[in-house]
Image (cartoon, coloured by chain):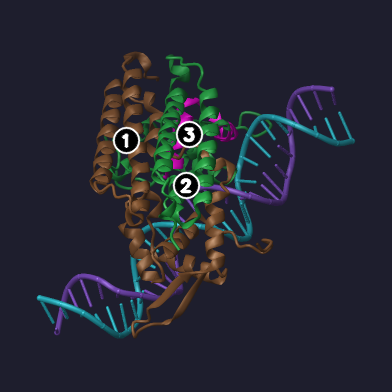
Chain colours: A brown, B green, C cyan, D purple
Amino acid sequence: MVHARGMIRLTELDFCVLGVIWECGPLSAYRVRARFEESNTAAWSSSAGSIYPSIRRLVRAGLAVAGSRQDERGTRLVGITAKGRERLRAWLVDLPPKIGTATADPIRTRAQFVTSVSYEDRLRFIDNARTITREALNEVEKVTKVKSTGSDTMLEYIGNLGSIFELRARLQWLNRVADLLKNKRLTRA
Amino acid sequence: MVHARGMIRLTELDFCVLGVIWECGPLSAYRVRARFEESNTAAWSSSAGSIYPSIRRLVRAGLAVAGSRQDERGTRLVGITAKGRERLRAWLVDLPPKIGTATADPIRTRAQFVTSVSYEDRLRFIDNARTITREALNEVEKVTKVKSTGSDTMLEYIGNLGSIFELRARLQWLNRVADLLKNKRLTRA
DNA sequence: GGCTCCATGTAAGGAGTTACATGATTCA
DNA sequence: TGAATCATGTAACTCCTTACATGGAGCC
């Protein structure tokens, strides 16, 4: 365990990329990007302009290694190093304290100003919020049918399950909010 | 209803600031910032470098008005306009379709790589995640004791309730994940 | 006189997105 | 031959954060 003196700061995205490099073995930067695009997870939306620089940073920090060009297309396979695995482990186990707070939910943000509109618009807001949340929930549930306990699909299943729990909780919360807003006199000038 | 031709794009933060200007009546930029600092909501962390430019944008777009200087300190009160209220309403009612998907949760992100570490480290991860989530939950519950249905505290209550629902769902999910990970052989090389 | 709070901002920098640029391979 | 896919990347832009700069008011 080397003392971490000049340890480069990595973003959440960098760790995600490192995780994918671990999970999918040595693979090309192009494949890493494709993996991010496949994923339905919100945190995983990513573009060439961030993936390529991220991989470069990981390689420079010695957490990943890029092999020599494999073919005429210029494909270059990237793999994780021992140092990279150690860093990934620390990211998982040593959680920063504030990481446990509730996430930023754009629907919840809007709900905090819901009495600024008329009674009818309030109902409309709740209704729309419920609809799009249900749609998102259906979407995730559809891709989570197979509840395999094999390690291949396990990680994806865990992630999807987290989304399902969150979305169901949001629906329950919206029901509660609807009840609270039944009072027509709440709208403020 | 004017057709929105040269309508300036606003960020979520801009709308939040506009919402606070609506909610707290005409107030100084300094007070807006203070309101953001008080708030325990994740989406509301904000700094001078973003609040002041945001208010300037709102004023330029005609959604807020800044009065003349009130005192020798240079205090300038900002209020919402009719156009601003209409824009706030549209933000609430016309939800963009993708807004309903599950949020980016750093704990869920980490969980998706949990089989990269040893059995013991996996248990450690789950345990830490549970602890900090419970702490965050206690924190929100503490400030949400008063379940007033008056419109003064209503909006804050709705927001806190949303956080509580999310955090409870995360705890349930973590219990499920713990069960799934009981199998010691899952760790991958 | 100095500390804290009120009140205004700017400058530098980090991180990520969109859009573009380039070229090989594969397949209909 | 042309379209889709594989594969690499950069440039400009946006948005936000950290840190700094400035000064008045109130109080001990």
Chain part drawn in magenta: B11-37
Instruction: Identify the element where label 3 is drawn.
Output: strand
To which residue does mark 2 refer?
Answer: B106
Q: Earlier in the sequence, mark 2 or mark 3?
A: 3
* Marks 2 and 3, how far apart at CA: 38 Å
Asked if marks 1 and 3 touch (Cβ < 8 Å), the reply is: no
Q: In the displayed structure, does residue B30 sit left or right of residue B162?
A: right
Main SS of residues in magenta: helix
Can residue B46 be seen here? The reply is no
Question: Residue A64 placed where, x, y %?
Answer: 50, 69
Kind of residue at badge 3:
Val
Residue appearing at x 41%, y 71% in the figure: A26
Magenta run includes residue A181? no
Q: Residues within 10 Å of mark 2 (few under 14, many from 20)?
A: some
Image quarter hosting the N terminus of chain B: top left
Left/right of residue D20 with respect to residue B16 in the rendered view: right
Separation of marks 2 and 1 at Cα, in angstroms: 30 Å
The answer to the question of whether label 2 and label 1 lie on touching residues, with beta carbons closer than 8 A, is no
Question: How far is mark 1 from mark 3, CA to CA?
Answer: 19 Å
Q: Is residue B23 magenta?
A: yes
Q: Amino acid at mark 2?
A: Pro
- The residue drawn where x is 35% and y is 14% is A185
Q: Which residue is mark 1?
A: B90
What chain is tagged by disc 2? Answer: B
Percent across and percent down for residue A80 are: 48, 68
What chain does mark 1 sit on?
B
Residue pointed to by mark 3:
B65
* C3 shown above or below A50: above
Q: Is residue A7 above or below residue A137?
A: below
Q: Position of residue A168 (x, y in %)?
A: 32, 34
Q: Confirm whether circles 1 and 3 share one chain.
A: yes
